[in-house]
Image: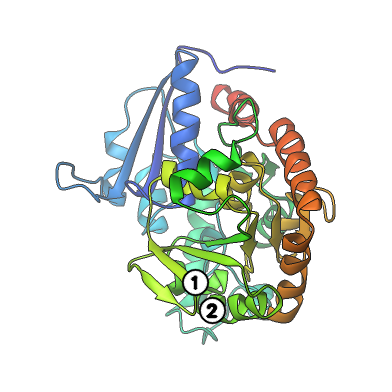
Amino acid sequence: MPHSDPKAKIIHHTALQKRGGARRVAQILRDCQQGDGIDARMSFEIPEDTAFTGTQPIDFGRRLEPDQVPHLHASADWPSLLKSIPRDTRCVITLHDCNLITGGCPFPLDCPHFAKDCEDPCPRGFPASFENRRIRRERLDRLQPTLVSPSRWLATLAREALPGHKVRIIPNGIPWPESPPDKQAARAALGLHPNARAVLFAAHGGMRAAYKSGEAWPVYWREIKRRQPGAVGFAVGGDTAGEQDGLTLWPYVDREKLGTLMDACDCFVYPTLADNHSLLILEAMSHGQPVVASPVGGVPEQIEDGTTGFLVKTDPEEFGEAVSDLLEHASQARRVGHTAFLKGGKRFDAKRMAAQYAPLYNRQE
């Protein structure tokens, strides 16, 4: 696979310093590029550590070094960020959600206003949606960046919203372990019984993650418990710890702790309403965990239904039935999880992703 010129200089820019899928992809790419001897760095707008200060979107362009290629992943103010970059600058933008191609919403779902340039008034209350979308498109037209989508689904929407712009498809990737996890060691670390039937819910924001059906997790959990009374459940990603109807609530945890949970559980439950190319699904696959997820957005591009996971209508009863079936048939869960681990390692490894991005920094195609 092609590699970037080691002399290349790349600056990955995100909105958040530490959290979020866009920041995670930027960090993975930076680490891979640094491993290849490339001058790859990161900047961010919103510091989450008092020892650092962020870069305001309007100031980003003037801070670029000569021949440094900006790779933009997320921004709290896309119009100002795009305006700050000189017209002839080589620039790569990864579309992690739909915000850049709408009037402000991260996912249009089935909104009829998307096909009408987000005409006002926005059904979801985003102010000046038509004008905001026009400004975004105008500034993208001026800059002519290289656009990348991790999913075919979002690439199709982007081409519709940005006529004249070519959108490449590069699936997300994560560092993939060489061998499947040791489930019993993970269970011992968490104090779980070796024969427990355990499921995991996770999303940035936890039960407040609207696009991930977070507020409905207890409903999904009750359906699972109704069929599997002895099941153990974990919900991760919110800002409080506790317990609700037997579902253990954990706030945001570091990657190591999340990995231990994924190693220990039998199934990752992901009733998402909208998704581009979920890193959580990839994380679960890399830990040999079968995923039960909604067939929305780019999710069907990640999961082969019945082979590496299961695609289920976003409905508590249907999810409850699918998850219960996996918990009831442990050998099937192990087989699907192992297949997800093997196939995912070939399709979604971080080095593969970095190699596909490499040519984009060397020329404007």
Name the image quarter holding the C terminus: top right
First along the sequence among labels 1 and 2: 2
The image position of residue 124, as x and y in percent, is 51, 83
User: Which residue shows up at 54% across the image and 66% down it?
Assistant: 233
Q: Dot 1, how many residues are within 10 Å of its Cα: few (below 14), some (14-19), or many (20+)?
A: many
User: Which residue shows up at 68% across the image and 79% down it?
Assistant: 316
Asked which secondary structure carries label 2, the reply is helix
Q: Nearer the viewer, residue 207 or 322?
A: 322
- Which tag is nearer the camera, tag 1 or tag 2? 1
The image position of residue 9, as x and y in percent, is 41, 22
Left or right placement of residue 76 versus residue 177 in this view? left
User: Which residue shows up at 75% across the image and 34% down it?
Assistant: 342
Q: Which mark is residue 218?
A: 2
Confirm or deny contact between disc 1 and disc 2 (CB under 8 A): yes
The image position of residue 320, as x and y in percent, is 71, 74
> Is 287 situated above or below 19?
above
Q: Quadrant of residue 242?
A: bottom left
User: Which residue shows up at 31% across the image and 50% down it?
Assistant: 57
Q: CA distance from mark 1 to mark 2?
A: 8 Å
Name the image quarter holding the N terminus: top right
Kind of residue indicated by mark 1: Leu
> Is 18 situated above or below 248?
above
> Is 206 situated above or below 223?
above
The image position of residue 226, as x and y in percent, is 67, 81
Asked which secondary structure carries label 1, the reply is strand
The number of callouts visible is: 2
Q: Which mark is residue 182?
A: none
Kind of residue indicated by mark 2: Pro
> Is 195 situated above or below 222?
above
Question: Pointer 1: what residue?
Answer: 247
